Image (cartoon, rainbow, N blue to C red):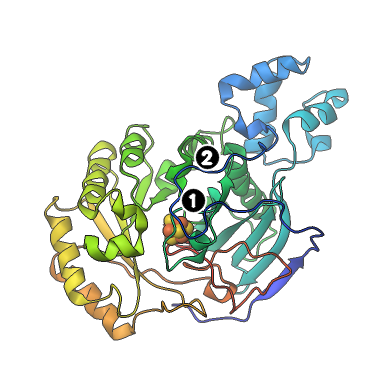
Amino acid sequence: MPAAETPSTVIDAPVAEPSPVAPAGPGQLVMTAPRRGKPPRHFADLEPSERGEAMVALGEKAFRGKQLATQWFERLEDDPARMTDLPAASRERIAAALLPTLLTPVRTLTADKGTTVKSLYRLHDGALIETVLMRYKNRDTLCISSQAGCGMNCPFCATGQAGLTRNLSTAEIVEQVTAASRALARGEVAGGPGRVGNIVFMGMGEALANYRSAVAAVRRIVTPAPDGLGISARGVTMSTVGLVPAIDKFAQEGIAATLALSLHAPDDELRDELVPINRRWKVGEALDAARRYFEATGRRVSIEYALIKDVNDQAWRADRLGKLLNARGRGWVHVNPIPLNPTPGSKWTASDPAVERAFVAALEARGIPTTIRDTRGSEIDGACGQLAAIGPEQPTTGQVTLGLPTAGKPA
Ligand code: SF4
């Protein structure tokens, strides 16, 4: 775990009204997101093939779609006045129709000398989401949200306990990436100008439960510029608690992204409790799907395992996990144990370091590549188990009890 640093709030804009959207099914497993008013349509919602048509509908020439894509995705330009290849008379109209503001920054917290940045955004309907940007020597990693809240109801994660507010649209997901990319490109983040190279779907939500928007967003992210952001698919990690049919579907999308399976227990008895979706798709079924993903894509799968003191951190469980993985072949998987971030008020806490080491040793004894993930960002509640989209009127550090088990981890 990196040395903790006192966080600093760099923006703390007032937000007048409380969120008008209430989450559905707190304390229950919710597979289908509540239907809410749709976010405004945005250029990033459109497939490249739809953009010319959208311009024609505005009375413009179809090729303006390509020009706008170049401005938005390649140059990361968000000021219509500077989109000088578009006719001056049309710029504001095009922007009003196709570039509505989807994410309003509410608050930004920084740590690690400004190189870890957690951003809280308000959506058009008042729902809140968060992203975490982590800068490393050789890469910039962004952890993004796919839903406002989460319906998976994992008991050690109060994001899930608080329920699912709604799915994000494709553009609401993509715009998290363009916003961070823009800030980096403009040198607004400590550490100098940079570029988002890794995207992890480990913020709020179960991305594969919002399949259509999440996968469309991945396409926008990996499509070469100017039609998309041109980030390598190898830098994208899709995280899931194990929605088996969706894993199989994603394996057939032709996108060479990494799959991260949040397992957290190798036995159904415990996993039924820790990850309630396990009552629907068992450990064996989730691992089989992960193995099929590897076979279809050639991408080694990550198994995420939040180490929870005296709950799932016994060496015999590591041994059992190693056996289960080896039973499905060699060289296809990597395990990432993650010390659970303490969430005050919760009975769940991180394993002792000696227990953690014994857990890793048991996996390695079975020949399983294993890397303990750091908990960067924990001091700003931006590490795993801590993304909560807490409003600015609420405490921000040391008191947040909501979050994710796998959020904020670099790929
Ligand atoms: S741990 Fe992940 S999948 Fe489970 S409730 Fe929290 S956000 Fe949802």
Q: Residue at x 30, y 54 (%)?
A: 278
Is residue 377 shown left or right of residue 59?
A: left
When the figure is inspected, residue 206 is found, relative to residue 322, above or below; the finding is above
Q: Name the residue type under label 1.
A: Ile
In percent of width and height, residue 105 lies at 72, 55
Q: Earlier in the sequence, mark 2 or mark 1?
A: 1
Q: Are marks 2 and 1 in contact (CB under 8 Å)?
A: yes
Between 320 and 80, the one lying in front of the other is: 320
Is residue 362 shown left or right of residue 44?
A: left
Residue 354 placement: quadrant: bottom left
Between 119 and 125, the one lying in front of the other is: 125
What's the mark number on residue 221?
2
Q: Quadrant of the C terminus?
A: bottom left
In percent of width and height, residue 99 lies at 73, 35
Q: Residue at x 83, y 27 (%)?
A: 93
* Residue located beneath label 1 in the image: 199
Asked whether residue 157 appears in the rendered view, the answer is yes
Q: Quadrant of the N terminus?
A: bottom left
Which type of secondary structure does the marked residue at label 2 adopt? helix
Q: Residue at x 59, y 53 (%)?
A: 23
Q: Name the residue type under label 2.
A: Ile
Cα–Cα gap, marks 2 and 1? 9 Å
When the figure is inspected, residue 306 is found, relative to residue 259, above or below; the finding is below
In percent of width and height, residue 323 lies at 13, 61
Residue 275 placement: quadrant: bottom left
Is residue 87 shown left or right of residue 208?
A: right
Q: Residue at x 36, y 32 (%)?
A: 254
Residue 169 placement: quadrant: top right
Which type of secondary structure does the marked residue at label 1 adopt? strand
Residue at the outermost right position: 89
